[in-house]
Image: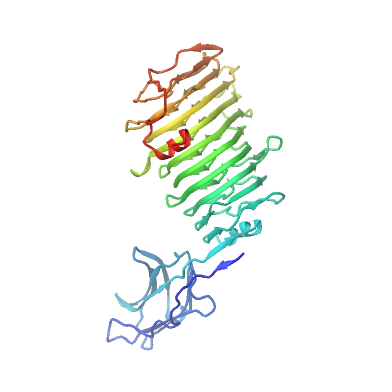
Amino acid sequence: MKKIIMLVSLFAFVFGLQACNNNDSNITATIVVNEDQGIQINNATFDITVLDPDFEITGNIFIYLSNDLSTVDTKTYSSADSISLVSFSNLSAETEYTIEIQATIGRDSLTVITETFTTLAQASLDIETPEDFFAMSNNRSGNYVLKNDIDFNGVEFVTPFTSSFIGSFEGNGFTLSNIKITESRLYNGVFGYISSGTVKNVNINQLEIGTEEVPIETSSSTKTGFLTGYQASSLSVIENVTISNATMFLTTSSSTYAYVGGIAGESRGRIENVIIENSTISLHTTSNAIVRLGGAIGYGYESAQASQLDIDVDLEYGLEADISTRSDRTFSIYVGGLMGDVDPQSTNSGMLKEMIYEGSITLSNVDYNTNENDEANYSLYVGGAFGVINRSFDMMYIDATIAITVDAIDVENDVNQSLRVGGFAGLVNTYNEPTQIVLKGQSITLNYDANQVQARVAAFIGLSRLVVIEGYVLNAVTINDETVNATLNLTTLTSLNDFFDSEFLNEQLIGA
């Protein structure tokens, strides 16, 4: 792995010999940059000496580390003799910090010395080979630059970030291809776990996460996505990414959760200008795990932001629940062409906008395997765009074919089954009136026992609460082999020209 050396400034090894704010005190201190470890990108080590020749110190000695915003570390020592090598970690690159040493004299606190230092600039690390890519695991805060296309054909692929990535990955428009992920992980995807890191300007082509013949199997919770399993911070950015010809086959027996999506299993950061083409996600569960499945994002946390998404992903979900002796098994399953479930936004910038979904959503077999003593709720929300959406959204184009089969329960029980299906969403909660929403030529096919399942079906949302919408009506809604009228009175468009106020949507849909 090559390093591009960036010009950094180093300062003298000795900051100062003493600094006292009390002329009557003879307490002095020195802070010397350690020769072996010194000042690095994210850490700094000093040789610190505190001298108290007159035994004035009566209590603890405190060493504070702060930046412009706040105190970031405090170290406490019972005596001057116990202070020698002092290290600070988890620092930010190219940031000025202040070290302040305070000594306790009676009931007073004396500032003995105050000095500043600046951490080094982050070096850029070139990525040219599969080995370079995997070696990113050795430095999760690195700034990485892809220098060429990388073909992983015949190379065993393990995501370099099984724990949080806080650096940056600049793809320069190059492509990572022929990636095969065969291992089960809590955070699974090409980049595994992105915390406050940035991934941008990269293409991914021919990606397999499991296969139809040999799906990835897990008994524990999972967050899995083509790009990342978990985008964990509101500071994280995923931008200008294209994923093509990707497939995922995943089976889980976890009774906790399964968050699965084309871009991210769970997102808490910003995602912008991401295209997924000709791809498939197949998720099967065998227990009562919370399921959040989306063509783009499985679960969007309250800080998640997303815009300019073009998602062409066929979704397939199946439930074959194991027989259980538990009587309180609750099933919560949210599936959406774009996102399975989206929390209310935490900031005004949390709107979801400028999105396309084109594909099929198939729940081929939903078998809760209910016991006679079950007294739980079974909730299934499915939508062409969202399973459940709890925030503002705008400018959407949805062309989804939805097919759902729910197995009948053949025992006596007190289970409450609810099914909410919408050409746009299973459930919508928003205080803003969305505009420029197009539903195109969709169909919904449902098969279930009408005596057991409480179902609501609509073109726009799967319940009676309505909002203004402009777009196409559903082509057909079929319930138990009978065609029903489940459409709303929507405006029918003859052309998309001049409909969207979005350069991204116009370019993707009509080439404008």
Quadrant into which the N terminus falls: bottom right
What's the residue at 53%, 75% (across, down)?
Answer: 37
Colour pattern: rainbow
In the image, is residue 281 above or below residue 207?
Answer: above
Residue 372 horizontal/vertical position (percent): 58, 21
Residue 507 horizontal/vertical position (percent): 45, 38
What's the residue at 54%, 44% (across, down)?
Answer: 242
> Would you say residue 268 is visible in this rendering?
no
Residue positioned most to the front: 512
What's the residue at 59%, 41% (across, down)?
Answer: 244
Give left or right: position of 18 versus 138: left
Give left or right: position of 279 versus 383: right
In the image, is residue 73 above or below residue 82?
Answer: above
Residue 23 horizontal/vertical position (percent): 27, 86
Quadrant into which the C terminus falls: top left
In the image, is residue 63 above or below residue 322?
Answer: below
Residue 298 or residue 274, whichever sits in front: 274
**How many discs appear?**
0
Residue 53 horizontal/vertical position (percent): 38, 88
> Would you say residue 464 is visible in this rendering?
yes
Give left or right: position of 11 versus 188: left
What's the residue at 55%, 46% (across, down)?
Answer: 227
Residue 349 or residue 187, whichever sits in front: 349
Residue 250 or residue 64, whichever sits in front: 250
In the image, is residue 201 above or below residue 126?
Answer: above
* Residue 473 placement: quadrant: top left
